[in-house]
Image (cartoon, grey):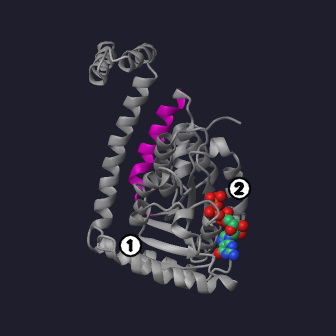
Amino acid sequence: MAQPSTEELITRVLAGEISALSRAITLIESSNPNHFAKANEIINACLPHANKSIRIGITGVPGVGKSTFIEAFGKHLSSQGKKIAVLTIDPSSSISHGSILGDKTRMEELAKDPNAYVRPSASGETLGGVARKTRETIILCEAAGFDTIIIETVGVGQSETAVHSMVDFFLLLQIAGAGDELQGIKRGIMEMADAIVINKSDGDNIPKTTQAKTELSRALHLFPSKKSGWIPLATTCSAKTHDGIAEIEQIISKYIELTKSNGYFDTKRVEQNEFWLLETIHNQLQQDFYTNSEIQDLLEKTKKAVQNNEYSPFAAAQLLLETYFKNKP
Ligand SMILES: Nc1nc2c(ncn2[C@@H]2O[C@H](COP(=O)(O)OP(=O)(O)OP(=O)(O)O)[C@@H](O)[C@H]2O)c(=O)[nH]1
Ligand SMILES: [Mg+2]
């Protein structure tokens, strides 16, 4: 099949055509340098049509029910005529493989929904790479008419920070009785959360989740107040029975209403754009530096010299940087 021209692809993405959207995202994800210019052209054309959605980040340790929750929440939004794009950030998926397939199967119903689009993250990438591509994918999805963007990330490592810096609302999913230790919840992640939702609040589990909600609500009040003016809250839900799902939508709506009226919503997006501008520069500079073959050789040698106390780390760094910049046009 002939490849559509970039212009045609743009027209079709803007018309909300899913196959064109998928193709454009594949161009963004491609590591083929010939695709960079095309991808950038598409992103630039989409930018004026982007920015109109609500972006929601969902995190929580493996097995907490993120995918099941997103399916329930997504169906709920879809039933009101909303258009939902679900992206996942999983920098480890190239190693663990299973996740991508797992997510697809677990969100089967949502993936079939005409109002929804489910797209797992690019595999075989560093977090920096995945994050940049996801940011750009958000733009394309918004331009294609999706009004709610949901980003799922595994609750381990640095990926929450990356997701937090690309969403409006950050939701932490937990289960009751596992203990913070077990759930790998670092204080930093709790502080980032705009809401903590205790999932699996069904059957015999309800008393435990209700108690966890009370304890968490108390703990959340001890956290420093947020720039958004929003006080994070704890609630319960069951992704299985859909109990509490509608309430979570209301919580998010209230947050959006508050932050749009006090200006924080726009300020945060401006700050996020600045963050990604600098982040991309840092990433590319680093990559260019460390993949330079002369630098790679010299770095090995200087590492040894530093180990043997022949060079101070600072003098060695200086030497490396001077060598790097000398060869730049
Ligand atoms: N009882 C009950 N089980 C649930 C609920 N939500 C999810 N589960 C089950 O918990 C298991 C894990 O759910 P997933 O949605 O795959 O969890 P996840 O957080 O996306 O997991 P990873 O993608 O591996 O990080 C599945 O067996 C679900 O059926 C719930 O609300 N109640
Ligand atoms: Mg999942």
Q: Which mark is residue 256?
A: 1
Could you tell me which quadrant the C terminus lies in? top left
Q: Residue at coordinates 40% horizontally, 60% vertically from top-left?
A: 188
Q: Taking 9 as reference, is 239 above or below it? A: below
In which quadrant of the rendered view does residue 4 lie? top right
Q: Earlier in the sequence, mark 2 or mark 1?
A: 2
Instruction: Give the CA distance from mark 2 to mark 1.
Output: 31 Å
Could you tell me which quadrant the N terminus lies in? top right
Is residue 113 visible in the rendered structure shown here? no
Residue 80 or residue 1, whichever sits in front: 80
Q: Residue at coordinates 46% horizontally, 77% vertically from top-left?
A: 216
Residue 247 at x, y percent in the picture: 51, 82
Q: Residue at coordinates 49% horizontally, 51% vertically from top-left?
A: 159
Is residue 137 visible in the rendered structure shown here? yes
Q: Which region of the structure is painted magenta?
A: 34-54
Q: Taking 317 as reference, is 222 above or below it? A: below
Answer left or right for 192 relative to 145: left
* CB of mark 2 near ligand 1 (< 8 Å): yes
Residue 182 at x, y percent in the picture: 57, 63
Determine which residue is flagged by label 2: 102
Dot 1 crowding, Cα within 10 Å, few <14, some 14–19, many 20+: some
Q: Residue at coordinates 46% horizontally, 80% vertically from top-left?
A: 215
In which quadrant of the rendered view does residue 95 lie? top right
**Foreground disc of the pair 2, 1:** 2
